[in-house]
Each structure stands twice: as structure tokens, then as C-alpha cells.
Image: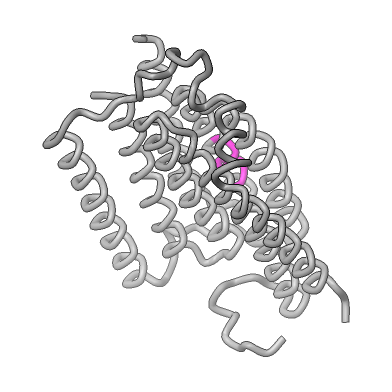
Amino acid sequence: MIVEQVVLIIAGALALVSALGVVLMPNAVYSALMLLLNLVSLATIFLLLHAQFMFAAQLIVYAGAILVLFLFVVTLLNPQGENILRDKHRLQQGGAITLGLVLACVLVGGLLYAFTSGTQPDLATSVTQTGSTYGSVEAFGQALFTQFLLPFELTSLLLLVALIGAVVLGKRK
Amino acid sequence: MSSITVTMVVSALVFTIGACGVLLRRNPLVQFMSIELMLNAVNLAFISFGGMNGSAEGQVFVLMVLTVAAAEAVIGLGIIVAMFRRRRRIDVDDVNTMEG
């Protein structure tokens, strides 16, 4: 139990640091690599929350497919590095940082207030009672193909639209 | 502090950092990566609440978000590449006309 807590704290800190890295790195390739670190640490947290299927899906779909697409486009376009610390839009930057701080205060404050005033939330304890956990592939598939069958089928339509859109956008005139 | 509290605070902070990234950066590629950060933060919140209630429904929503993120990355990167072909540089401030 104490090991899980330690791993959770480390993965959470790593997720925060790498998220800052995505925003602050001047070179877009480094940003993409920082995004990879962020995705992997979030996947670790998913595993600690007993979501094994989502851990695998996160690594395969995000780290495997989407990130490779990002790196491919970054290296294809080779954009100039930008240092946001030497940006000339000072007023805009100040406004963005102020708004970010306000958003962080509201979100974290609201969460901590909700979690300390009511009952302490924790992971559900019914993990091992039924033999299979709620995050297992079995439970996930059960929910996906019975209760959420229509949304799941509609996802295929979304993917088809994205496919056609990509072909139209990539076509040379 | 319970693990749900930790994961929810991490989720809120990663979401905020992603929102700041969209506002601060002028490179559309990095803005896209920031949007991915925000989507991931929401995924973490879904899985945390799913674990709190002991149901797999949160993960079903995460699968939908994953699909939308993949579709969005394909279309967005296609738009950026088309933009680069036309103007030879990519900066969000250059994009101020709708015609193709």
C-alpha cells in the first residue's frame, strides 16, 4: 500500500513537470518528447487506479500512434524555435498567466473543499469481491458492448469522417 | 490524503498547464500538444471518478475521448501541413482568412 502511494506521488510529480516542459520547451521536438513522458506517467497512474485496459490503450493509441504522428509533422515542418520568455507580447502573456493561476486556484480549491468537507473519497473497495475488478477488460467490455453499444458504433462514424477529412486536406491541388 | 485526491489535483493542474500552453505559445503544433494535455487531464479525472464509484463506465468515456483525440490530431495536423504548404511558415497569427 505504501509502495503504491510512493509510486503515485512520483508519477503525479513527473506528470506535472513534463506538462510544464511541453509548454516551456523552445524546441517543438522537445515538447513532443515531454508529452511522451507525460503520457507514460499518466498511464502509470491509470494502472494504480486499477484501469489496466486504459493503461494499455493509452500507451498504444497515444504514445504509439498520436505521438508518432506529432513527431513526424514536427520534423517535416521543422518550425523555428520560439522562446516564450523573450516573447514581445508581454500584456497577452501576463493575462494568460493570470487567467491560468485563477483557473488553478478555482479548480484545486473547489476539489479540496469538496473532498475535505464531505466523506473522504477513496478507491472503491469492491475490487476483489466479484473476482474480477471493475477496471479489467472483462468489466470494461461488458459495459462497452451492452450499455454503451450505440455510442461505440457512432465512434466508427467519427473515425470515418476523420479519415475522409485527412484525405481531402492532404490532397494536392 | 487518499489517492483519489492526489489524482484529481494532478488532473486539475495538468489541465490548467495545458490551457496556459494554448494561450502562451504561438506555434500551432505546440498548441495542439497542449490540447492533448488537457484531454489527458480529463481522462485522468474520468478514471479517478470511475475508480471511486467502482464502475467501468468512466473508462468507456475515456475510450470516446481517445477516439476524438485521435481524429482531432489527424485533422489538426492536416490543417497545419496545408497551412505550411501555402505560407512556408507556421504561426497562429498568420492565419486570418477563411478562404483555402
Is residue A44 in sight in this rendering?
A: no
Q: Please state if A38 lies on the left or on the right of A168 as rendered.
A: left
Observer-nearest residue: A139 or B8?
A139
Which residue is at 77% across, 62% downward? Answer: A163
The residue located at (26%, 50%) in the rendering is A107
Residue ID at (55%, 38%)? A143
Q: If the image is split into quadrants, where does the N terminus of chain B sit?
A: top left
Question: In which quadrant will I find the C terminus of chain B?
Answer: bottom right
Residue A159: % across, % down: 71, 58
Q: Which residue is pictured at 43% across the width and 13% down the height?
A: A129
**Nearer the observer, A120 or A146:** A146
- Determine the residue located farthest toward the top in the rendered image: A2
Horizontal and vertical percent position of residue A43: 54, 31
Task: Find out whether residue A34 is within the magenta segment.
Answer: yes
Write the start and end of the magenta stretch as one range. A32-37
Q: In the rendered view, would you say A132 is above or below A142?
A: above
Tell which of B49 and B100 is nearer to you: B49
Q: Is residue A86 above or below residue B58?
A: below
Asked if the stretch drawn in magenta spans residue A96, the answer is no
Name the image quarter holding residue A39: top right
B90 or B61, which is in the foreground? Answer: B61
* Residue B88 placement (x, y as % from top left): 73, 74
Coordinates of residue A136 in the picture (x, y in percent): 56, 24
Can residue A80 be spotted in the picture? yes
Q: Residue furthest left?
A: A117
Q: Which colouring convention does the figure follow?
A: one colour
> Position of A96 compared to B70: left or right?
left
Q: How many marks?
A: 0
Q: Say if A46 sits above or below A86 in the image.
A: above
Q: Main secondary structure of the magenta part?
A: helix
Q: Is residue A145 above or below residue A6?
A: below
Image quadrant assignment for residue B49: top left
